[in-house]
Image (tube, rainbow, N blue to C red):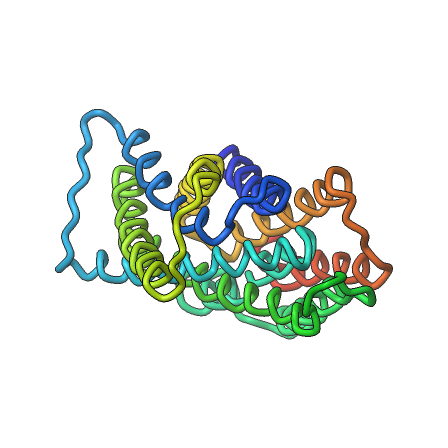
Amino acid sequence: MLSLILSVLFSVLLLVNFRLHPNFKVNTFQAIILNYPVCFLTGLLMMPAQQHFEFDFFNTGSQYALLLGIGFVVTFILSGISTQKMGMTATSLANNISLVIPVIFSLLFITKSGSFDALNYAGLALAIGAVGLSTFKKEEAKGSDTSRNWLLPLAVFVMYGITNTTFNFLSAEFIKTDEQRIPYTLTILIGSMAFGALVLIYRKIQLNENINFKSILAAFPLGIPNFLSFYFLLKALSDYDNNGAYVLPLYNISVIMVSSLVGIVFFKEKLTKLNYLGLLLALVAIFLINHQGFF
């Protein structure tokens, strides 16, 4: 349970970082790309003294991990933009309600938590409605084109669903012991770093964009909790026999509630009655989706 709690706290800290970037004029895109080397170094420092990291490109598990690393970069960028334009609550809800995708996959292909029944389907329908209600805003930000901002949480929903499903599957397939957890995570990060470097090179050539020093500094408070949230979620899955149908809903419920509270209390985010209804529907949806895991 401790691993799950720590994963939740570090995940919320990521959203707090994104929320603070505009205040310090940080280039969020650059900070996200640069956070992956920080993640990698954090993982190396956390490895036990008797362990060493070896990268085998021709290993099937490594190739899947590299592709997942690319997916994490895309998802993280979407999450950062959505947090700034739509707020912590809406982004967190879209992020965490995406559990419908890995939970369905987990129920059908990884665990034997029970068949997918009418209550699960009802939860899926409520989850989609919850994302829509929680992101609906009558007032748009001044001086910006926000007519399609609602697409950001939707993109976060889809991408987090895909990456979390892949993450859960690869965890079950290729991480058989605790000793494999950090090395495999580092392999995923190699994919993220390689893709990130290509993107930075492209932006330098096409846009003549230079790396901002503030972005380098911001990469550290972003990269360290990013790795730790990833690591402790892996550990929580391992502690519960990779039962994503049980772990992921608990994780997502907690992140939704904590991030919403932080957004309201510390960042004065304003929620409408419809937004609160969306938040309530999200909790009900998560319960219905995973009722097999609770009983």
User: Nearest the camera: 163 or 85?
Assistant: 85
User: Nearest the camera: 191 or 34?
Assistant: 34
Label total for image:
0
**Residue occupying image coordinates x 40% and y 56%:** 209
**Residue occupying image coordinates x 40% and y 67%:** 109
User: Nearest the camera: 224 or 236?
Assistant: 224
User: Which residue of the protein is positioned furthest toward the top in this rendering?
Assistant: 49
Please say if 206 is above or below 167.
Answer: below
Q: Position of residue 249 (x, y in %)?
A: 58, 54
206 vs 146, left or right, is: left
**Residue occupying image coordinates x 41% and y 45%:** 234
Q: Position of residue 176 (x, y in %)?
A: 27, 47
**Residue occupying image coordinates x 66% and y 67%:** 127
Please say if 80 is above or below 227.
Answer: below
Q: Check the picture and name the quadrant holding the C terminus.
A: bottom right
Q: Position of residue 166 (x, y in %)?
A: 39, 62
Q: Could you say which quadrant of the image residue 205 lies in?
A: bottom left
